[in-house]
Amino acid sequence: MVLILIGIVVLVVIFLNKKDTVIDTTTIEEVARLKAELSQKDQRIGELSSDLQIETTGKDELSGKNKQLFVEKTNLKAENDNLLKDKGELIKELSNFKATEETRRKEHDTNIQKLSESKNALDDEKQRIRREDEQKLEKEKEERNRMWAEHEDNVKIQLTDLCKAPQYAFQYYDNKNLPVEFGGKFKPDFMLEFLGQYVIFDAKISESDLQNYINGNVKATVEKINSNPKIYSSVFFIVPTDALRLLKKIRFYEQGYDFFVIPPEAIEIVLASLRKISSYELAQQLDPRERENIVNLIAEFDYHIHLRNALDVLGAESGASVLKKVDTLKNDIKDEIVVKKSKMRLQQFTPTDIKTLMIDTEVQKDRINQLILPRVAISEEDIKIVKPILRKRS
């Protein structure tokens, strides 16, 4: 547009130079006006040229920026593609992770459920075992209480039956039928006549500290006897067999009296010893050898009872020591042991079998021989050869 205007102006000027002789005043004025306009146009053209230059410069700058932006866009696009690729991989990994996590969560929930069910089952089993143990302990307590409650009556019945037996035939008394010379607070459970005196048998029971109870009864009984010459110097306290292992001391000597703590099984042995002694009219008239035999017999009875009591105590202590070792086992093994033990039944011994072995020593020997059979056959000749060697070593 600017170039067209410049061309028109140039043509006008040339035309004016050729026709200046024929130009009238109007034409001159028109030319002047056109010159003025041309000047304005030139000025405007200059301004436009300046603006064009500015625009061109701006366009160049924009073109440069555009190229830079294009490069940046290209780089960003590449980065975006990489990011999209990474995003896709991350999405894929996230999906796999979510799937794995979901599987793990389900497995975890399943394991938690199983663990909870196992714990509940274990708790139920423990409660069942605890209830069984409590019931067992309660039954044992009831049985022990029944045993203690029946102990005194059973001892009286046993003593009465033995005193009535022809091989013993002792005159006897209980606390409801005592001789005339006995009265007041001293009422022993059972007495029998022996060489003009009375032998005291007292059944003792205690649910707490049996040893202290026996200790106190020894002193209390001596005070009640009060040096009565009609009382024999040996007094027998009878406790249940199972309770005997609770005692560390079973023989006492107090103010001239010997006190013996024995189980019911030893009553007949004591009566047999007393009957052996009382079979003579006067103990002073006994033959020295016969007296020695009696003393030896009583000593052996006494020794045997004390030995048996000691073995029972040591066996109980050894058993308690073994039971303590159970605490070193793992809890699951201990639980299995408790379950297994709860299913075991106590071995029952009939009173007939016990009494048969107690009365007949030959039966005892036969039963012992059965335990050690079959024996190894050793000839007499071999025994003769070995005996000198054994003597040398000993």
Image: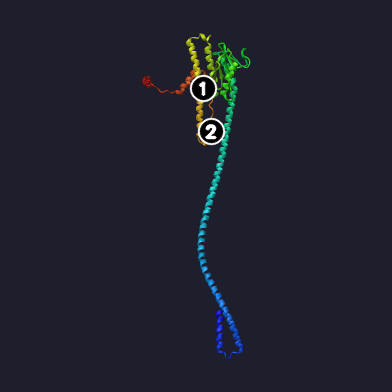
Residue annotated with mark 2? 338
For the view shown, which residue lies furthest in the bottom direction?
Answer: 21
Task: Name the element at disc 1.
Answer: helix
| Label 1 Cα crowd, 10 Å radius (few <14 / some 14-19 / many 20+) | many
Mark drawn on residue 66: none
The quadrant of the picture occupied by the N terminus is: bottom right
Q: Is residue 196 above or below residue 56?
A: above
Q: Is residue 330 above or below residue 366?
A: below
Q: Residue at x 57, y 34 (%)?
A: 128
Q: Amino acid at mark 2?
A: Val
- Foreground residue, 243 or 256? 256
Which percent across, then down, holds residue 364?
Answer: 49, 20
- Foreground residue, 162 or 196? 196
- Of circles 1 and 2, the one toward us is 1
Q: Is residue 293 visible?
A: yes
Which percent across, then down, holds residue 166?
Answer: 55, 13
Colour scheme employed for the rendering of this structure: rainbow
Give the quadrant of residue 112: top right
| Label 2 Cα crowd, 10 Å radius (few <14 / some 14-19 / many 20+) | some
Q: Is residue 81 above or below residue 173?
A: below
Sequence order check, earlier mark of 1 and 2: 1
Q: Residue at x 49, y 11 (%)?
A: 291
Task: Name the element at disc 2.
Answer: helix
Mark drawn on residue 309: 1
The quadrant of the picture occupied by the C terminus is: top left
Q: Amino acid at mark 1?
A: Asn
Which percent across, then down, holds residue 368?
Answer: 47, 21
Q: Is residue 156 visible?
A: no
